[in-house]
Amino acid sequence: MSKVNRLLEAEHIPSSLWDSANETLFLPASLTEAYEKLIDKYGLRNLSSERKPDDPPVGGITQKRTDQYFAQAFDGSVARAQLALLDPKCDLASTSNTCLSSIAGNRVSITDAPCGPGAAAFSFLSNIAELRAHDALPREPLDVLLIGAELSEPARKYANELFLELQPSLEKQAIFVISEFISWDVTNALSNTDLIKKMTHASNENPNQLLIVANFNSFLERPEKRKEAEPQLNELFRHASGPKSVAIWIEPNMNRAINEGGLFPWLRKKIATAWKMFAKEKTTTTAPILESSAQFECLLHLGAARVGLAVMPINLERNT
């Protein structure tokens, strides 16, 4: 197998993001600062200190479940997306290249669905800003139309407030973002149509498209939920496709996501089947399942934890 040429060599990742000697990720300072402001604003520090690393909460539509996730698991989700973007251990160069080439410069529409409080999209954007600040990436103007799709209203509220805190630091690095956080229920066809309309409008403005799906296994691991969601997911991927379109699906590296019968093998089969129906030209339908792991420094000075990543990059590029 030929070696993939990396857009970001591991040795060029600044020490503010990666300690190579101890194989430890540090979350971007701008995102750390924004997060701490919200934690203090809503009085969640005590809840953060009650985290159980072996049993992190997965969030939900209520304020209580959203607060538990935001206080105890948000930083792990940020670190997981950061690991996919930076790939400091050189486990998934093609995935890192895909993400970096989509958002390094020019114009891009990003859809993060489900976005929760914004962990994946904000991880990508704040890491790009930090790389630019250390001259690891060129500081070219980047115009972003960001659509965050999420069923939980409390999570959408946190995402919007985090964005407002992050915006000045992004613009300092010539990253200009217009964001919108909308309600989305993957099991509801009409809700999915609303999201697709937003995506279509965004792609007309910014033809480079990046679809991020993260931390969905806890919802989709039940067969009945997969069955309900399948038509909407097929439609979502179809409308996200185009001449300059990619998707990346990020999950914790757990057996129930990657083993036979798990989310990723199921998803790979369904995408291949749907793509044969939708695509007029020959397209690559076999999406690899890649894995990596690293330590990361938890937010709020709560020590180090380990994050496992399973990621599936999906080629949505087509000529028509």
Image: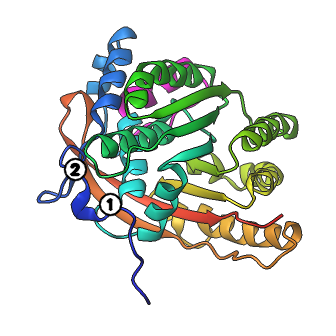
Instruction: In the rendered structure, find residue 14 and report the number of the disc placed on it.
Output: 2
Crowding near pointer 2: few (<14 within 10 Å), some, many (20+)? some
Q: For residue 292, what is the image quadrant?
A: bottom left
- The residue lying at 50 percent from left, 61 percent from top is 311
Across and down, in percent, residue 218 comes to 56, 47
The answer to whether residue 187 is seen in the rendering is no
In the image: residue 69, left or right of residue 19: right
Instruction: In the rendered structure, find residue 67 and report the number of the disc placed on it.
Output: none
Q: In terms of secondary structure, where does tag 2 sit?
A: loop
What's drawn in magenta, residue-wise?
Answer: 55-73
Across and down, in percent, residue 307 comes to 33, 52
- The residue lying at 55 percent from left, 54 percent from top is 102
Instruction: Pick the residue in front: 223 or 3.
Output: 3
- The residue lying at 11 percent from left, 59 percent from top is 21
Instruction: Residue under label 1, please give it.
Output: 293
253 within the magenta span: no
